[in-house]
Amino acid sequence: MTARAIIDWLKARADDVAAALLAAMFIAFLLQIVTRYVFNNPLGWTQEVCLTTWLWLVFWGSAFSVRDRDEVRFDLLYHSVSAGMRRKFALVSAVALTAGFAASFPASLDYIMFYKIKKSAMLGIRLDVVFSVYAIFALAVIMRGALQVVHILRGGAIEEAAEARDA
């Protein structure tokens, strides 16, 4: 099995996790509607499931499923300058984001670990487990940003830098 095949398989599994999270959120949402408006007996835990799966879906999807070219950007200035200046913009942006996430990671991890003493109100899930997805997201951003910096410094095309990061 080639490295590309392994990466493609891992991406497909990450997409499967995102799809499962979306399905769980949708089922809990439907259950919440039915119990509230049909049976007039709302279930409190469905709201917690919806909130937790939404949190996980956003960070998991951003870390592993959303490609760089699929993100919304405000790049009017970026596209109005020369290719050399775009390379500088891309490098400064990648370095700043990577450095920012790397610098904040230890404190973020401490904060997540602090929440091991608390549990969610309805389901009793430890909050460090709930918020651990942010650490996964931050590590993915750091790794993808570092790959983009290396690609740009090696002289790779800046349009390919995002594709190298998404690979």
Image (tube, grey):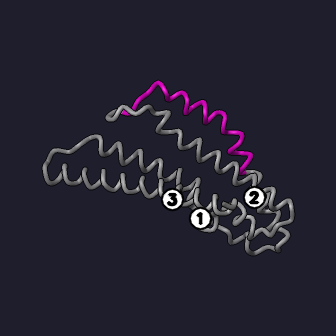
Which mark, by number, is residue 71? 1
Distance from the alpha carbon under mark 3 to that under mark 1: 16 Å
Q: Which residue is more in the foreground, 81 or 64?
A: 64
Residue drawn at x 14%, y 54% as measured from the top left: 38
Badge 3 is on which residue?
15
Residue drawn at x 79%, y 73% as measured from the top left: 81
Crowding near pointer 3: few (<14 within 10 Å), some, many (20+)? some
Badge 2 is on which residue?
148
Quarter holding the C terminus is: bottom right
Q: Quadrant of residue 73?
A: bottom right
Quarter holding the N terminus is: bottom right
Residue stretch in magenta: 97-120
Position of 53 with respect to 165 (left or right) is left
- The amino acid at mark 3 is Asp
Callout 3 secondary element: helix
Q: Position of residue 11 (x, y in %)?
A: 58, 59
Mark found first going from the N terminus, 3 or 2: 3
- The amino acid at mark 1 is Glu
Crowding near pointer 1: few (<14 within 10 Å), some, many (20+)? few
Mark found first going from the N terminus, 1 or 2: 1
